Image (spheres, rainbow, N blue to C red):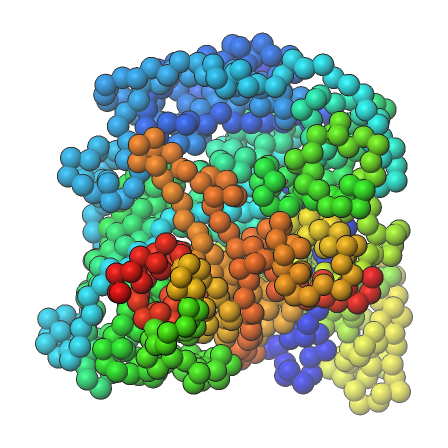
Amino acid sequence: MPEKDKKQGTNISRRNFLKGVGTGTVAATVAPSVLIGSEKAAEAQAGDAIANATIELNINGKSYQVEVEARTTLLTVLRDGIDTGGNNIDLTGAKLICDRGECGGCTVMVDGKSVYACMMLAIDAQGKQITTVEGLADGDDLHPVQEAFIQHDALMCGFCTPGFIVSSAALLNENANPTMEEIKVGLSGNTCRCGTYPFIFDAVKTASRKV
Amino acid sequence: MASWGEASESRLIGKRVTRLSGKDKVTGKAKYTFDINEPGMLYGRILRSETAHATVIGIDLSEAEALPGVKAVIPLIEVGNKLRYQGQEIAAVAAETDDIAKDAIRRIHVDLEELPHVVTEDDAMVEGAPQIREDWAGNQSEPNVREDGDINAGFDEAAVEVEATYHTPVQTHVCLETHGHVAKWEDEQNLTVWASTQGVFGVRNDFAQHFELPANQVRVITEHMGGGFGSKFGPGIEGRTAVELARITGKAVKLMLTRKAEHLVAGNRPSMTQQVRAGATSDGRLIAYDMKGYGTGGISSGAGFTGPYVYHVPNSRAERVNVAVNAGNQRAMRAPGHPQGAFAMDSLMDELAEKLGMDPVEFRRINDPNEVRQAQYTLGAQEIGWHRRNTVPGAGTSVKKRGMGVGSGQWGGGGGRGTEARVTINADGTVEAVTGTQDIGTGIRTVIAMIVAEEFGLETTDVRVKVGDSQPGLPSGGSGGSQTTPSVAPVIKTAAAAAKQKLFERIAPLLDAPVGDLRVGTGTIYVVSDRTKTITWKQATGQLGMESISEGGTWEEDLRQNGAAGTQFAEVEIDTQTGAIRVIKIVAVQDCGLAINRLTTESQVNGGVIMGLGQAILEERFMDPVTGRMLNANLEDYKVPGTLEIPEIKSIVFDTHRKVTGVGEPPCIPTPGAIANAVYNAIGVRIRSLPITPDKILDALAEKA
Ligand code: FES
Ligand code: FES
C-alpha cells in the first residue's frame, strides 16, 4: 500500500494518519500477559465462500433479477443490490437500524404483511409481492398514511419514518379502524428516538378514517 | 430595531406549518448519508477491540488483504500502543460489499497483552483499583469546587434537613442513523463527504486540516440526518478513516458505525452520583446545600452536572469529581449535565417539602426566583389536576397506585453570531434561501421558508431552501445547545428584509409611490396610501429583467433571546405487586420565546419529554466488571421508549415574548425528576436511582413493609 499512498496526491503518510486519529504513543506498562490468538471461533462462523445464485424478486410491481449469496438479506438487496443489468436497485427508504429485528426501521410489506427486511433472506422473498415505502404512493397521490404523517408532523429526523409508514399501512390493512391501544400494539415493533410517537398515533387515527 | 412584528399581523410566523421535507421523508425519497450509493462505492468497516484494556503486540492484516473483493486494509493503532476501552479502533477495511468487509474484519489477527481494567466508577474509586489514567491519582480528576455564602451558618439556621444520595447511570444517545460518512475524492485535491453530522462546517474544517487541503476544496453535505442529540459534531475517527480508505482506493467509501459501535464509542451521557445534605427554614426557604458528586464520562472527563440547579440557596457548596473507567468517551447529550442535576435537585426538593409538611409546588414557589416558571407552576398544576394528588404518599390499599410529581428545568438557547445566509429573488418570481446550517430533524428548513415567505407575502412552498452543504461557502455553526433557530432565524429575517427593500426600490417608480409606502400582501405588492395600486409578486419581480436580487443578513440580537424555563408535571401508576410503572400523563409547560413554527415546536417538546421518560424508567448502560464489556450494546437490552411506554403528553408551548429561543434540549430536563416524585407520591417510598425499574420498586416496597 505504500505505492498506493504515493499515487494519491496528498502528503499524508499512514503514520501521520495514525497520529491524527488519536493513537499517539503511550508506553506500555506490562502486566501479567494473556495472549489472545486469532479468533478461530468467529472465523468458523464467517459466512463467505458460499455459491451465488441469481434470483428474481418482485418489488413494487417491478421484476428484478439479482445475484445473491445465501446469506444476503432482503434489506441488503433493496438498499445495496445491483441487478443483473448493472443498475443499482437503490430502494433506500427501508433502513438498517438495529440489524436484529428490534426496531422496525427496515419494515416492508411481503404479500401485504409487514416484515422486517433485515431478518428475511432474499432467497425467501422469491415469488412474493414486496412493497417498500417507495411503492406505497400511487404516482403523485400519497397513501393516506403518508398524507397524515405530514399533516400531523409525525416525523422529525425522519429516519424511522419509512418503517413506521409501512407498519401503519400494514396495520390499517388488517384493522381499518384501530383503537389507541391497538395502534400502540400494532406499532410496538417500531422505534423512534426523536420521540414522534404522540403525533404518529394522531396520524394513524386520521389515516384510518380515510382508508 | 428589528422585530418580528405583532402576532396579529403574522400570516405564517407562530402558526402550525407542515415540514417542507415531509413528502420526501414519508415516501422514502429523503437521502441520508446512509442512503448514498455512489457508482463503484466500497463499504468500509472497522475492527474494534473487544478488550477493555490491553497493549497491542501484533496486528496481522495479510489474511484480510488476501480476501477477494477487499480493496484496502489499514491499521488504526500502532503496535505497542494501548487499547483503553471496548470498541476502540484497531484496523479498517474497504471492500466491494458490506458482507465481504465483514468477512475481512474477521481475518484480521490481533495479539494483545491484556491489562487490568475497571469499568464502573465505584470500582475505579476503590483503593488498589487498577490505575487506568496516569494523570489522575486514584482515577479521579481534581475536584471542581464552587462555594457560595456560609454553609455552616446556613445549616445552623435550618429547621429541617435531608441527607440523601442520588444516582443517574450512563445513558447512550442511540441515534437511529449511526455515525457515518460517504467519502469521495473528486481528484487529488477535491474531497466530497456526505456526513451524518450536526455541524457541516466544523466537519469540513476538520477534514481540510487533517488531510491538508484548502477548506474550499472540501465539500461536506448533510441533506438529511437521522438524529444526533449532541453526539455528532466532529467527523471522529470513523470519518477520517472513511476519507483515508477512499484516498487509498480511489473509490467512494461508505463507512457507517454498527449499532454496537454506536453504543460503545459514539458518546454517552455521563453518570452522576450526588451525596447531598440540604436544609430549609421553617417558613420554607432553602438555606443550605452541600453536595459531593462524582460521575464518569468514560476514559475522558466531562461528567458535569448542576446543583442546586434552578433553586436559590444562599449558602451552598458543590464539589464534583470525574472518574475514569475503561469505557468509551462521553459526548454532549441533550442538555448536558442538566437532567442529572435536575433529577437530584427535584427529588431533594420534595424530600425537604415533605419534612416541612409543605406542598411541593408551594415549596418551589418560595425558592424558585424565575418568574416564567412561577406562572408555569400554576398552569401545569391546573392541567394535571394537582388537587387530585395523594395528600399522604402511598396511601390506600389498592394494588395499583397513582401519584403525581413536578420537576423543573432551565436552558439558554439564545443563539449566536457566525451564520451567513443569502436570500435571492429571481426575475421569474422564484425565491431561494441558502445557508450552511443543517436540519437535524428540528425543522429549520421549514422555519427558514416561513420567515422568507412571511416577509415576501408568499407560501412556504414557494421558497427553495438550501441547507446542509458547505459548498456555497455560507457558514453556520453546529446544531447544538439549542442554538440553531436563534442563530439562523435573525440572519434569514434581515436578509429577506434587505432583499424586499431592494425589490421595493426597483418597483417604486412603476407604482409611482415612495418606497416607504410599499407593502406586501398575499402574493402581491401594493401601495399603502392608495390600495388601487397593486401588482402581483410576479409582475414585480418581472421588473428585474436579467438580474436577481441577492442579499445577506446580519444577526440582530433583538430578534432572539436567551433563557427557556420549563416545568413538567407527571402522573404515574405503579402496580405494587409487579413493580410495573406506567407513566399516564405528562404536562410539559415549555417557555419557547417566539415559536416560529408551533407544530414542529410541539414535536420538539414531545420528543424531549419522551427522551426524559426513557432516562427516568428505562435507559442504562450495563458494564460487566469481569469482562470489561458493555452487556447491552444493542436495541433489545438497551431499552429506549417504544409505543407502549408513551403516556398522554400535553405539550404546552408557553410563548412569553416575540423573540426566538431554541428549545431542542430543555424539554428533556424536568421529566425524570417529575416522574421520580410522582412515583414517591404513588407508593410512599423513594427511588433515588434512575432508571426507576420494577425491581427497584419492589425492593423499596419490601424494605418499607
Ligand atoms: S433493522 Fe430490521 S428490525 Fe431493526
Ligand atoms: S423521527 Fe427521528 S428517529 Fe423517528
Asked whether residue A132 appears in the rendered view, the answer is: no
Q: Is residue B50 above or below residue A175?
A: above
Q: Along the horizontal axis of the image, is B197 left or right of A56?
A: left
Asked whether residue A133 appears in the rendered view, the answer is: yes
Q: Quadrant of the N terminus of chain B?
A: bottom right
Q: Along the horizontal axis of the image, is B540 left or right of B380?
A: right
Snapshot quadrant of residue B7: bottom right
Viewer-side residue, B47 vs B477: B47
Q: Is residue B176 above or below residue B236?
A: below
Rendered location of residue B563, percent (x, y): 44, 71
Counting the numbered discs, the total is 0
Q: Residue furthest bottom?
A: B529
Snapshot quadrant of residue A194: bottom right
Quick check: which quadrant has ligand 1? top right
Rendered location of residue B568, percent (x, y): 45, 72
Viewer-side residue, B11 vs B677: B677
Viewer-side residue, B218 vs A165: A165
**Residue pictured at 19% horizontal, 81% vertical:** B281
Q: Along the horizontal axis of the image, is B432 left or right of B474?
A: right
Rendered location of residue B444, percent (x, y): 63, 60
**Residue pictured at 50% horizontal, 55% vertical:** B480
Viewer-side residue, A132 vs B496: A132
Q: Is residue B257 above or below residue B528?
A: above
Q: Quadrant of the C terminus of chain B?
A: bottom left
Rendered location of residue B225, percent (x, y): 62, 48
Q: Along the horizontal axis of the image, is A19 left or right of B529?
A: left
**Residue pictured at 41% horizontal, 23% vertical:** B77
**Residue pictured at 29% horizontal, 50% vertical:** B295
